Amino acid sequence: MKRDQFISFFFIAVLAFIVYEVFQIFAPFLTAIFWAAILAFAFYPVYAKLRRIFPKRNNSIALLMTVVVFLIVVPPLIMILINMATQIIEFSQWSFHYVREGKLELLIEKVRDIPWFQAVQARLVASADVKNALSSWLLGTAKTLGNLAASQAGTFTKNIFFVLLNVFFMSFLTFIFFRHGEKIYRFIYEIAPFEEETKKALFTQIHETFVAVIRGQLLTSVSQATVAGILFTALGVPLPLFFTFLIFLTSLVPILGAASIWAPMAIYFLLMHLFKKAIILFLVGFFVISLLDNIIKPAVIGEKTKLPYFLLFFGIMGGMKLYGLMGIFLAPVVLSLFFALIKIYRTKYSEPS
């Protein structure tokens, strides 16, 4: 091996080791870094417009945007989490009363009266074992949710210092991303070990994917949750905030989405002979809530990323398992980069000589 080759390999090995160590150093803050970057990216167009209007006020504009972003995001989020913990506890108490007052058995009896399922219900639902299993499942689920809410509330109270510390880190990092976002982008762009044409294609793909995912996911989730919240309140659904928040979360997952919440609720109303509520919930759920998902996500995310919807579904599910909530945003980017790299490889390296 020549001396120059040895030096090159040694340099690469040292660089890889240092990069790994830097990653380990910042690993405890990766969540804060990621969400700060998402917030800054989402509101960066507003910051860019203000900076063009006031070109000599970069620091002031970055600070103002950081304050505005956190006033928009943090207080509502804290209020939602507190209300969610309260309503989960209320849900657990409601479940216990529901079973103890015999309402679960009444629901089973009403299910048995449905003509189309009489034969099946006579064998399954009428069984005392099934009744006991349903009661145990409902009570167990309620107890688990109640304990989870209570423990999370206690954890939140005990770790309030670390929560505030993370909020401080996110706000500081958001300011940094606003103020120096272009420099950070340019630095990463310049050190990327690709040809100029390849770099441009990959970074454009990353940018378009992030824009599409953030806009598509948030627009869909907020729209569906807003409609569902108004509908649940109007229909007198118990714990409307709890179920609205579930709509917001499930709407982030493609295909199944919000229907996994409103459809069982409509069936419950139907079984309880609340036909008017069941019909209204089904019609609004199918033609408004779920239709929003089928219109916004394919138009915004699928069109921009060029990813098949079924692939996006499995990608987001796998991404959430691997990265947690961050996987909702990271999985489409990884998939888009995969297909972009495959396209570049086929164009540049697999063409016959």
Image: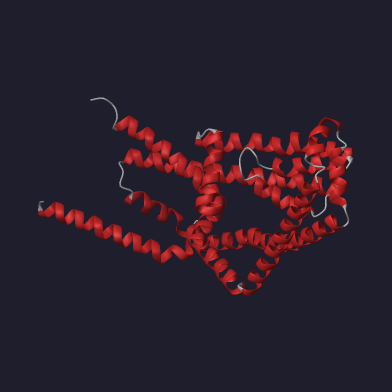
Quadrant of residue 199 in the image?
top left
Where's residue 318, x and y in %? 52, 45
Residue 126 shown left or right of residue 145 in the figure: right
Whether residue 47 appears in this view of the structure is no
Where's residue 21, x and y in %? 35, 64
Picture mark count: 0
Above or below residue 254? Residue 17 is below
Which residue does the image show at 20% across and 54% down from the upper left? 9
Which residue does the image show at 59% across and 74% down from the upper left? 161
Q: Please identify the residue farthest to the top as the structure is shown.
A: 352
Q: Nearer the viewer, residue 61 or 308?
A: 308
Q: Quadrant of the C terminus?
A: top left
Which residue does the image show at 77% across and 40% down from the upper left? 124
Above or below residue 160? Residue 16 is above
Q: Nearer the viewer, residue 72 or 102?
A: 102
Q: How is the image coloured?
A: secondary structure
Where's residue 54, x and y in %? 53, 56
Which residue does the image show at 45% across and 44% down from the upper left? 334
Quadrant of residue 257 in the image?
top right
Whether residue 172 appears in this view of the structure is yes
Residue 282 shown left or right of residue 255 in the figure: right
Where's residue 233, x and y in %? 83, 50
Q: Nearer the viewer, residue 205 or 46?
A: 205
